[in-house]
Image: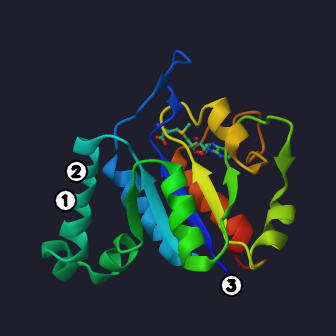
Amino acid sequence: LAGIFIALTHFPVYNKHGEVITSALTTIDLHDLARVAACYGAAGFFVVTPLEDQQRLAEKMIAHWRDGWGYRYNPHRSQAMGLIRLIRELDEAKREIAREYGAAPLMVGTSAVDNGNRLSFSELRKKIGDDRPVMLIFGTAWGLTSEAINECDHCLAPISGRTGYNHLSVRAAAGIIMDRLLGER
Ligand code: SAM
């Protein structure tokens, strides 16, 4: 399997007023997405933030769970946290994966909003395991900007449940999407 990666992006994302911002890191997002990544066999979890202080915060937290007291307390969590890779911008992930796997990843954005030009879950399922790795990109705050989505190769169809409401937390969305793509059918 060439592999699937996930990325959590803190820039560029929208705030409530539709302005482009850098959001603050939320430690529970890192824990929960790392566990989802570990559970479904993702090859890596990229945390994207250009802010130095936020990177330092993430490094401290990861080190605590990966090698420090947290490791002795809960080695399972350490295994999941070991998948996290801190980067400043998504392009870094593209370059790193291309170097490691010999092919740049297929970049797939996610959003609760249907932008028309979307890839269905079954279409994406077929692409996983091709020679080209797949990178699933999640947003924070009010979601990835339209420019960020347009820069992706594809946008995945939004999760719709049973009502018109589909604004999920990134933690719930990542769990559902990874299960639809990689879970047992
Ligand atoms: N503050 C929020 C939180 O607590 O998670 C962050 C919301 S952020 C907009 C949620 C992210 O989860 C989106 O950028 C997208 O990546 C994903 N997401 C949420 N709802 C979704 C849906 N219905 N379909 C696909 N992805 C979704």
Look at mark 3 in the image and give the residue it sits on: 1
Q: Amino acid at mark 3?
A: Leu
Q: Residues within 10 Å of mark 2 (few under 14, many from 20)?
A: few
Look at mark 2 in the image and give the residue it sits on: 57
Q: Residue at x 75, y 51 (%)?
A: 153
Q: Amino acid at mark 2?
A: Leu
In terms of secondary structure, where does tag 2 sit?
Answer: helix
Q: Residues within 10 Å of mark 1 (few under 14, many from 20)?
A: few
Residue 97 at x, y percent in the picture: 56, 69
Counting residues from the start of the chain, the first of labels 3 and 1 encountered is: 3
> Marks 1 and 2: in contact by CB < 8 Å?
yes
| Ligand 1 positioned in quadrant | top right
Look at mark 1 in the image and give the residue it sits on: 60
> Marks 3 and 2: in contact by CB < 8 Å?
no
In terms of secondary structure, where does tag 1 sit?
Answer: helix
Q: Amino acid at mark 1?
A: Lys
